[in-house]
Amino acid sequence: MAAKIAASAFFVLGGTAAAEWLGPRLGSILGSAPQLAVLSLIFFSIEQGPAFAAESAFWTIPGMGAAVPVYLGYLMATRLVPAPRAWSVAAGVSLGTATFVAATLVLSAIPLGPLTAMPFAAAVCLGAGYIVRRLPDTAPLKRGPISASLLAIRIVVSALTVLAVTSVAHVLGPKWSGLVVGFPVNGLPVMALLHARYGAAVIMPFIRMFPVGAFGICIFNLVASRTLARIGLPATIALAYAVDVAYLAAVAWLRRPRPVSP
């Protein structure tokens, strides 16, 4: 439990720090790296064994199809409840979570296998990317002072979410564990905290980037599900991260601002 709390605090603080110090453009790219997928792979391997963790990693691939609607639901909530800011944040978190629950129930009834999971995830990510294509990919952000109470709130929110999700997934078996792990356990708190502090404009790059990042998480889990039982946990994490980082680097290079020709 202490390890889960420490790891979740590291990810959420790292995500918000990346957005605040590097800006929404780079912060959204870094925030798209696997977070709960890594934690679940580690703790499921320790607690349930490599076979359980590998199967759970596979089911996280379609689970990302339920994570994408979380960001779309949050975006819709910011349009439906633009102010006051506290109500807008609450609406975003509530509607985003509700869309995840609904999407997970639908996905659990769809017969997906090794040959259909990745194409399905790619279709969901491409469709969502098309929907949010007109959102800005960056936003002005004026950093404010960081207080101990604010850091504590960030840690508590993330840790409670991680503990809740992993505890529920722990008793559901590998399929439902993988589907539940798709929940953006750190991405949603980071987005809500940035929204509460800086306004809705700052989170638009995160929403625009997430479908692209979600497919990278699918790639991470595909590599993990195929290699965990063969090469062990440390090598699997290193290899899966390397593949995902290469994918995100390619995306960042393709999305970089280009100079305007005279």
Image (tube, rainbow, N blue to C red):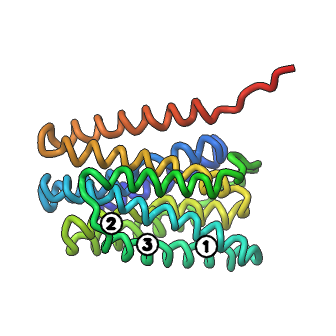
Tag on residue 147? none
Work out how far the residue at label 1 is from the one at label 2, CA to CA, in angstroms.
Answer: 21 Å
Q: Amino acid at mark 2?
A: Leu
Secondary structure, mark 3, is helix
Q: Amino acid at mark 1?
A: Gly
Which residue does the numbered mark 3 point to in the structure image?
A: 103
- Which residue is located at x 43 percent, y 36 percent? 245
Left or right: where 186 falls relative to 138: left
User: Which tag is nearer the camera, tag 1 or tag 2?
Assistant: 2
Work out how far the residue at label 3 is from the one at label 2, CA to CA, in angstroms.
Answer: 10 Å
Q: Earlier in the sequence, mark 3 or mark 1?
A: 1
Q: Amino acid at mark 3?
A: Ala
Instruction: Decide if residue 21 is in sight here.
Output: yes
Secondary structure, mark 2, is helix
Work out how far the residue at label 3 is from the one at label 1, CA to CA, in angstroms.
Answer: 16 Å
Which residue does the numbered mark 1 point to in the structure image?
A: 92
Comparing 215 with 199, the one in front is: 215
> Where is the N terminus found, in terms of image quarters?
bottom left
Which residue does the numbered mark 2 point to in the structure image?
A: 179
Left or right: where 209 falls relative to 135: left
Residue 181 placement (x, y as % from top left): 34, 63
Q: Is residue 92 above or below residue 14?
A: below
- Which residue is located at x 59 percent, y 32 percent? 254
Label 1: how many Cα within 10 Å (few below 14, some 14–19, many 20+):
many
Q: Earlier in the sequence, mark 3 or mark 2?
A: 3
Residue 202 placement (x, y as % from top left): 70, 55
Q: Is residue 145 above or below residue 227?
A: below
Left or right: where 83 falls relative to 96: right
Q: Earlier in the sequence, mark 1 or mark 2?
A: 1
Comparing 15 with 41, the one in front is: 41
Secondary structure, mark 1, is helix
